[in-house]
Image (cartoon, rainbow, N blue to C red):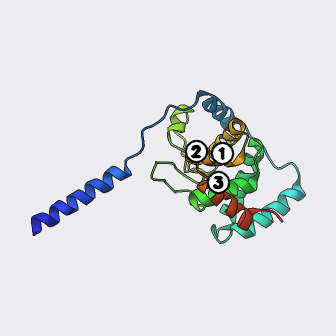
Amino acid sequence: MMLLRILTLTGLLTLALTSMAAPPRQAPDPELRSILMDAVAETAVFQDAYYAEVWLMDMSSRLERYIPDPYTRIELLKSVHKEATRARVSPELVLSIIHVESLFDPWAISRAGAQGLMQVMPFWRGELGLKDSSLFDMQTNVRLGCTILRYYLDKEKNLTRALARYNGSTGSFRYPNKVYKVMDTRWKRR
């Protein structure tokens, strides 16, 4: 009886460990690598103080339930707006992606090994010469995530397909539909 119990536990442990193994790493797209390297060196800011204040206040009140600390909340919103604007994507779309990907947990790690707010794969650090950088750093993660999203938008010419590709679920509408629902119910500006 004890031997059967040990064998069962060993089998379950083996099954759990093999299901947690990271998928084989694909070679990064050289064009995306180049775009991400440019993004690492680039910065942008709000261009209109009134708009910045209105947007930050609006989004901060919506984000408070996920990030209680006002300083952290405003820093994230500034980073999201800056990087989304730089990448020519909607800041509200980026907030929706972060909501779905990590629920605003900067320490989130997926089963595939993606890290941080926008769930960026760690191999990008090595590809971009950022080995000393952390994907758990809000600004690094949001900059790379927005740049990757822009790349997929340019390639796909279709937001739904770009979102599926961002999530690694090309051909499925499940992930894009989640992002759309969150954007419509939580982050869309009225």
Say which label, 1 or 2, has the lower sequence index.
Answer: 1
- Which residue is at 59% across, 46% downward? 171
Q: Quadrant of the N terminus?
A: bottom left
Which mark, residue 43?
none
- Which residue is at 66% across, 40% downward? 152
Which mark, residue 161?
1
97, above or below 87, in the image: below
What is the CA distance from the residue labelled 1 to the residue labelled 2?
A: 7 Å
Amino acid marked by disc 3:
Pro
| Image x and y of residue 108, in percent | 52, 57
100, above or below 44, in the image: below
The answer to whether 10 appears left or right of 87 in the picture is left
| Image x and y of residue 122, in percent | 50, 42
Mark 3 lies on residue: 176
Q: Are marks 1 and 3 in contact (CB under 8 Å)?
A: yes
| Image x and y of residue 101, in percent | 58, 56
Give the image quarter of residue 178.
bottom right
Q: Are marks 1 and 2 in contact (CB under 8 Å)?
A: yes
Q: Secondary structure at mark 1?
A: helix
* Residue 78 appears in the figure: no
| Few, some or many residues within 10 Å of mark 2 (<14, 14–19, 20+) | some
Say which label, 1 or 3, has the lower sequence index.
Answer: 1
| Image x and y of residue 14, in percent | 26, 54
Say which label, 2 or 3, has the lower sequence index.
Answer: 2
| Few, some or many residues within 10 Å of mark 3 (<14, 14–19, 20+) | many
Q: Quadrant of the C terminus?
A: bottom right
Give the image quarter of residue 36.
top right
Amino acid marked by disc 2:
Thr
What is the CA distance from the residue labelled 1 to the residue labelled 3?
A: 8 Å
Mark 2 lies on residue: 170
